[in-house]
Image (cartoon, rainbow, N blue to C red):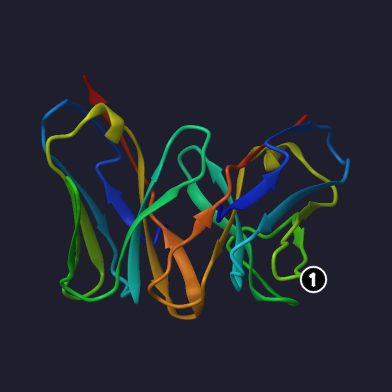
């Protein structure tokens, strides 16, 4: 089954404790992206990647890091999480080109206390 | 400031009624997509429109892309409780940049 897999689904952590949210897709998509979704603010892009070893900042990159060493994986790293990073996070992938949409993962609900 | 504004923000209707959701921008997009999201899940792609003036139908859902490729609408005929969810539009500009709308939360009451 074609899918984007995120782990974990739920995570509660403490301020300052480094964490990684994994994302993997099995569709050979070039384009991958991370979003956070907050009430009243909608989906905001954190980072995106056009292909292996090519990453760029989205609208809200502060406090996050990403890497794209393999085509299928695009982990999101929070080096020192803070409470304002409490949110619902989505990883998504797409074929490059204007006619194609995203396939989203099921989301990671992160709480930083 | 959001690049894409959706209206209405919230919509609660009775089963069997028709409705239209709008997605507007002052920017031109190379394509526009509609997604539906259920609570606790990721958005699921419903349709992509790429040509100005294009109309696509998906059973009871009709999607239209504006002639100038700046806006879009989603019309649902005879809404059912299973249509309940958050509807998101997303415009795509050059370089695969996606811009999501603010979302329309639809509740269909049986």
- Please tell me whether residue A64 is drawn above or below residue A41 in the rendered image: below
Q: Position of residue B19 (x, y in %)?
A: 15, 40
Residue A112 or residue A12, whichever sits in front: A12
Q: Residue at x 75, y 77 (%)?
A: A53
Residue at the disc numbered 1 = A69
Q: Residue at x 45, y 78 (%)?
A: A97
Q: Residue at x 11, y 29 (%)?
A: B16
Q: Position of residue A87 (x, y in %)?
A: 63, 39
- Locate residue A72 relative to residue B91 in the image: left or right: right
Task: Look at the image and tell me in which quarter the N terminus of chain B lies.
Answer: bottom left
Element class at badge 1:
loop
- Locate residue A105 relative to residue B5 in the image: left or right: right
Task: Look at the image and tell me in which quarter the C terminus of chain B lies.
Answer: top left
Which quadrant of the figure has residue B5?
Answer: bottom left
Furthest residue toward right = A17
Near mark 1 (Cα within 10 A), the count class, few <14, some 14-19 or many ≥20, is few
């Amino acid at each position: 089954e074609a899918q984007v897999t995120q782990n974990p689904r739920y995570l509660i952590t403490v301020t300052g404790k480094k964490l990684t949210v994994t994302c993997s897709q099995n569709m050979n998509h070039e384009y991958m992206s991370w979003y956070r979704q907050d009430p009243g603010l909608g989906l905001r892009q954190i980072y995106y990647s056009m292909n292996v070893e090519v990453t760029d900042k989205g609208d809200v990159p502060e406090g996050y890091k990403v890497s794209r060493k393999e085509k299928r994986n695009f982990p999101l790293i929070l080096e020192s999480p803070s409470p304002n990073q409490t949110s619902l996070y989505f990883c998504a992938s797409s074929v490059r080109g204007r006619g194609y949409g995203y396939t989203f993962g099921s989301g990671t609900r992160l709480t930083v206390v | 400031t959001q690049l894409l504004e959706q209206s209405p923000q919230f919509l609660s209707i009775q089963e069997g009624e028709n409705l239209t959701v709008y997605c507007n921008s002052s920017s031109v997009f190379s394509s526009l997509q509609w997604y539906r999201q259920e609570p606790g899940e990721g958005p699921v792609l419903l349709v992509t429109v790429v040509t100005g003036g294009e109309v696509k139908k998906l059973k009871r859902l009709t999607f239209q892309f504006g002639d100038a490729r700046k806006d879009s609408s989603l019309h649902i005929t005879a809404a059912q409780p299973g249509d309940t969810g958050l509807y998101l539009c997303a415009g795509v500009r050059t370089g695969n940049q996606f811009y999501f709308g603010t979302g329309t939360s639809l509740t269909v009451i049986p």
